[in-house]
Amino acid sequence: MSSSEERAYEKVKRAIMLKRLVPGQRITEDWVSKELNMSRTPIRAAFKRLESEKLIELVPNKGAIVYKPSNKELRDVFELRIVLETYAARLAVPKLDDAHLEQLEILLSDELETYKSKNFEEFLRVNGLIHTFLSEVSGNEFLLQEVDKLNQWSDCYLILRDEFYSTPMNEVKSIPEHRVIFEHLQERDSEAAETAIRNHLLSTLSDLSERTSVFY
């Protein structure tokens, strides 16, 4: 990847993350070209990369448009996540040891720090590690692959709809919800952990679904 392509990619992605570009909004090559003083060739390559990450759509005769997921799409993904991530908990709990729990506690601390520093990309990375943690402990490689894939899809929904930069710390739901899951894992209570995971994912789905009207 050229440095020009990387600059164009970061410029557009950052604008989407900051809600300067919102779902359904058109992005022109001309705008990026003028903003960064570059030719259109690396911009087209950057657009292809952003399309592969489900952040934009390349529509014939219209060009690039910020991706606009439907509530049904969100629901389909989160329903499958609930099935797989609760199953991962059921498989993983009997295998959990103190080293695993120490690793997860570090991730929870990292998540808190990334939110405090408002580092969205790092927050998404750590959040993904938290959500794939039990699948990894389970030892089922196919389960891990599917959970990781669904979390990558969910990342795009968070980027497009989450109010990360404007939500104060005391209103954040995911961090305390992750802590509740961790406490049940400490107790090796698989059933309670599964319920907490289900409730957490349903809460996230509800919040993201309600934010449609904010941007569309």
Image (cartoon, rainbow, N blue to C red):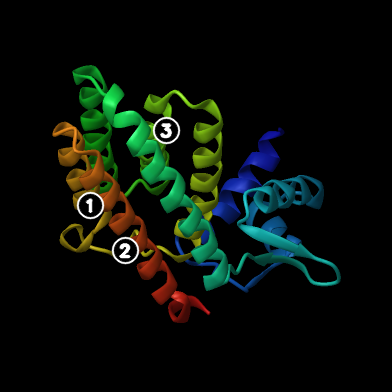
Residue designated by label 1: 177
Residue that label 2 marks: 203
Q: Which three-letter amino acid code belongs to the residue tagged 3?
A: Ser
Q: Earlier in the sequence, mark 3 or mark 2?
A: 3
Q: 10 Å neighbourhood of mark 2: few (<14), some, or many (≥20)?
A: some
Q: Quadrant of residue 137?
A: top left
152 displayed left or right of 53 = left
Examine the rendered structure and indicate whether residue 197 appears above or below residue 214.
above
The label nearer to you, 1 versus 3, is 3
* Amino acid found under the numbered disc labelled 2: Ser
Q: Position of residue 99 (x, y in %)?
A: 23, 18
Mark 3 surroundings within 10 Å by alpha-carbon count, few (fewer than 14), some (14 through 19), many (20 or more): many
* Crowd class of label 1 (few under 14; some 14 to 19; many from 20; radius 10 Å): some
2 or 1: tag closer to the N-terminus: 1
Residue located at (62% from left, 73% from top): 25
Residue at 36% x, 42% y is: 127
Q: Which residue is mark 3?
A: 135
Whichever of labels 1 and 3 marks the residue nearer the N terminus, that label is: 3
Quarter containing the N terminus: top right
**Circle 3 sits in a helix, a strand or a loop, which is it?**
helix
In this rendering, is residue 206 above or below 126? Answer: below
- Left or right, residue 207 beside residue 160: left
Q: Residue 114 in the image: x percent, y percent?
A: 29, 42
The CA distance from mark 2 to mark 1 is: 9 Å
In the rendered image, residue 89, in percent from the top left (x then y), is placed at: 33, 38
Q: Secondary structure at mark 2?
A: helix
Please tell me which residue lies in front, 216 or 118. Answer: 216
CB under 8 Å between discs 2 and 1: yes
Question: What residue appears at the point 60 percent right and 69 percent down from the top-left corner?
Answer: 68
